[in-house]
Amino acid sequence: MTQNTDQVTGLLLAAGGGRRLGNRPKALLPHRGRPLVEHAVGVLRAGGCARVHVVLGARAAQVRERADLSGCVVVDNADWEEGMGSSLRAGLRSLAGSGATAALVSLVDQPGIGAEAVARVLGAHTSPRSLAAAAYGGRRGHPVLFGADHWAGITATATGDRGARAYLAAHRDAITLVECGDVARAFDIDTEADLVHLE
């Protein structure tokens, strides 16, 4: 039985400081004339996430000032320098009491992943026990869907820049892989050379 996707909240991790990009926060990188974080929120919404929580960290005040995040729940992660794990924990905590039965987690620095990939992974949501991830040529990537039953376990194990990797490895057999390689490209914007992917 497929559950109503209104119960899935998009969770965008956008706190990184862009250390290898000359300390330019990834959320503020220009893409199609607007900050990258705005583009990423738009992708989640177009893919079917009616509710979106955005985790900010590096230069959070500037991001709020420059990016239109209206309609989003904005979460400030004071511990963003600890890595993606801290942002994932902060984001999942922000969903407590929201009525969401799952979180669809995406990363701000992957503009090659569009609404179609989000919609496909969203379609794998069937219950609070759901665990699903986009795959690219069979290899697990983002976005990732975490049913609410998994949130406590992920929060307890998400550390450093590994995010939920340890949890996902421990629950490998429970993950539904959703192939998205035909509709998305899973590159990251990490270095100056990667900026060629932004418009």
Image: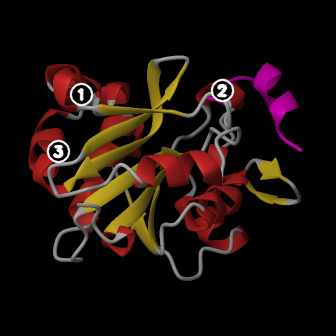
Q: Is residue 136 magenta?
A: no
What's under tag 1, amino acid-wise? Leu
Q: Determine the secondary structure under disc 2.
A: loop
Question: In what quadrant of the picture does the C terminus appear?
Answer: top right
Residue displayed at 22% across by 52% down:
147
Q: Comparing marks 1 and 3, which lies closer to the viewer? A: 1
Compare residues 45 and 86 and report the one nearer the observer: 45
Among the two numbered marks 2 and 3 on one chain, the one whose residue lies closer to the N terminus: 3
Answer with the quarter of the image where residue 33 lies.
bottom right
Q: Position of residue 15 (x, y in %)?
A: 49, 48
Distance of label 2 from label 3 (alpha carbons): 26 Å
Q: Which mark is residue 35?
A: none
Report the residue that reaches farthest toward the front: 1
> For mark 2, what is the residue?
187
Q: Position of residue 14 (x, y in %)?
A: 52, 50
Q: Determine the secondary structure under disc 3.
A: helix
Q: Is residue 189 magenta?
A: yes
> For mark 3, what is the residue?
155
* Discs 2, 3 touching: Cβ within 8 Å: no
Q: Comparing marks 2 and 3, which lies closer to the viewer? A: 2
Answer with the quarter of the image where residue 9 lies.
bottom left
Q: Position of residue 106 (x, y in %)?
A: 48, 47
Residue displayed at 46% across by 17% down:
139
Q: Position of residue 86 (x, y in %)?
A: 30, 43
> For mark 1, what is the residue?
168
Q: Determine the secondary structure under disc 1.
A: helix
Answer with the quarter of the image where residue 193 lies.
top right
Residue displayed at 44% across by 46% down:
121
Q: What is the count of numbered marks?
A: 3
User: Which residues lie in the magenta part?
Assistant: 186-199
Question: In what quadrant of the picture does the N terminus appear?
Answer: bottom left
What's under tag 3, amino acid-wise? Thr
